[in-house]
Amino acid sequence: MKHILIIGGGVAGLGAAFKVKRVADEGHPVTFTLLEKDPRIGGKIATEYVNDEWNGGEGERFVVDGGPDCFLTEKPACHRIAKLTQIFEDELPTDDSRKRTYILSRGRLHDLPDGVMMFAPTKFVPFATTGLFSLPGKIRMGMDLVVPKKQWSESERMDETLESFVVRRMGRECLDRLAEPLVGGVHASDPSQMSLAATFPRLLEMEQKYGSLTRGFIAARKKVEEMRRKYPPKPGQKRRTFFTSFSGGMQQLTEAMAAAAGRDHIRPGAQVEQIRRRDGGWTVTLSDGSALQGDGVIVATEGWAAEPLLRPVDADIANALSGIPASSSATVSLAFREDEIGIDMNAFGVLCPLAEARSLMAATYSSTKWPGRAPSGKVLMRGFVGGPHNQAIMRQSDDDLVEIVLSELRGILGVVGEPLFSRVFRWHLGMPQYTIGHLDRVELIEEQCEGIPGLALAGGSYRGVGVPNCIESGERAVSKLLGEWDIRSAEDGEEEKRYY
């Protein structure tokens, strides 16, 4: 019997654990123990349920996501896991009948122009009439159609920062007013450091193929529209929106994964202090002095947490991990009475560019975007603070963060009501930064791991921060170890199959 020790109980570690369980259910001699330092399983996926005590506790509740509140619908991993854990019917699309996004620009709110894809306009009239950009800014963005594509030598890795790429193609105003809040905000990253090849390689490829981002995204939009005409939704079929969540919040996914993997193999509150290779296997020592033996080990923690564990194992891996920075952030959720909040809630949220110098990075109208997040007559909003440009704010107390976010919502959106309650979720060094050279570091880590039998790494620090990416990284880590033991799962090669 082969035994795998999984360090880290976030969605990557759970992805690995559930994969091991499925392989074992096929009859293969393999099992696992998952070790998580916190008392709660799920990592940065965390959902809290708050009863509506302001209406007599009639059974209705608020669903408050503290970390990721969704995943990209086009990525199949979450759909596949939802099918396997029988929660697929609980998948929740956004309420696109109320879809609207504001961008703060020069102190005023502007609608995100219709037809903008990533940061390229694909419809002329909305772009020409928006007040989001100045006339010179619009002219400079239009020059994307004539700016020549960058020439790369065969010896170069095709990569540059988000700032360099956008300014080169569409100008500084496009970066400051649109690209940074839309693209950089997803990764809570610094545009001047963010590797495009590691985060959005499609943009680099699109420039080479079409010679223009605008032409590339127009072609992409037409393709999507053609597919929708060719394959209209079937009667009763679940609506397909850009983002998807779950009716019980994102923690519904991690709870289902933990239950399906087997909670008797999961040990919360187990802090790993040391990893050591031994003849034919591995020893993992915990903070209480106890030790576990395994044939393989998967480190599914943040890169900065993996670095000290792996330094005694391989200095090159540890050095590469130390080159992956991370930033801290927090989400602050606030609930209000709908008739007291004083603003129109028919929107998904607001983005605050760095150029506006606000403490708030963005805010989501959670109960608008996701049906069922608040009881009738109540609303739920969520603000984001922190990121690489404002780490100082993370030194504030929870009460101070609530006051900061509330003040920003009042000043930016005009919120006037008093919150019914607030919830603060802090994520210490929770967002890895994919800076220039990131792919080189990841390739070195992977090459070194290939030469160390029984070792694999997983998580959002390597090849994608989204929930589906993390699940797949955990599954790939298991496949690496199984391959070394000549164990082949029936589902190998099937992970990329579309399930939606």
Image (cartoon, grey):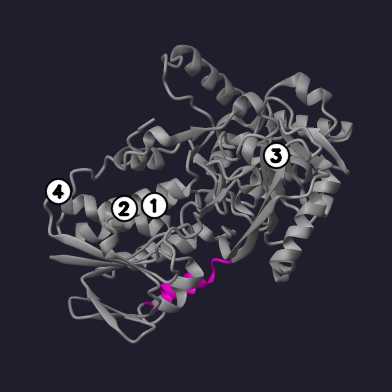
Query: Residue 410: horizontal and vertical position, in percent?
Result: 83, 47
Which of the two marks, 1 or 3, is nearer to us in this view? Answer: 1
Residue pushed farthest bottom?
Answer: 289
Between discs 3 and 2, the one toward the N terminus = 2
Badge 4 element: loop
Q: Is residue 336 left or right of residue 373?
A: right
Q: Amino acid at mark 4?
A: Glu
Q: Image height check: is 338 above or below 184? A: above
Between discs 4 and 2, the one toward the N terminus = 4
**Does the CB distance between marks 1 and 2 fall below 8 Å?**
yes
Which of the two marks, 4 or 1, is nearer to us in this view? Answer: 1
**Quadrant, the N terminus:** bottom left
Give the CA distance from mark 4 to mark 1: 23 Å
Badge 3 element: strand
**Could you say which quadrant of the image residue 206 lies in?**
top right
Residue pushed farthest front?
Answer: 56
Give the CA distance from mark 4 to mark 3: 45 Å
Q: Which residue is mark 4?
A: 26
Query: Residue 31: horizontal and vertical position, in percent?
Result: 20, 62
**Does the CB distance between marks 4 and 3 fall below 8 Å?**
no
Q: Which residue is mark 3?
A: 349
Residue at 78%, 49% in the rendered image = 418
**Exactly how many numbered labels are in the figure?**
4
Q: Amino acid at mark 3?
A: Gly
Q: Which residue is mark 1?
A: 255
Q: Image height check: is 457 above or below 194? A: below
Q: Residues within 10 Å of mark 4 (few under 14, many from 20)?
A: few
Q: Image height check: is 331 above or below 242? A: below
**Does the CB distance between marks 4 and 2 fall below 8 Å?**
no
Q: Which residues are magenta?
A: 314-325
Which of the two marks, 3 or 2, is nearer to us in this view? Answer: 2
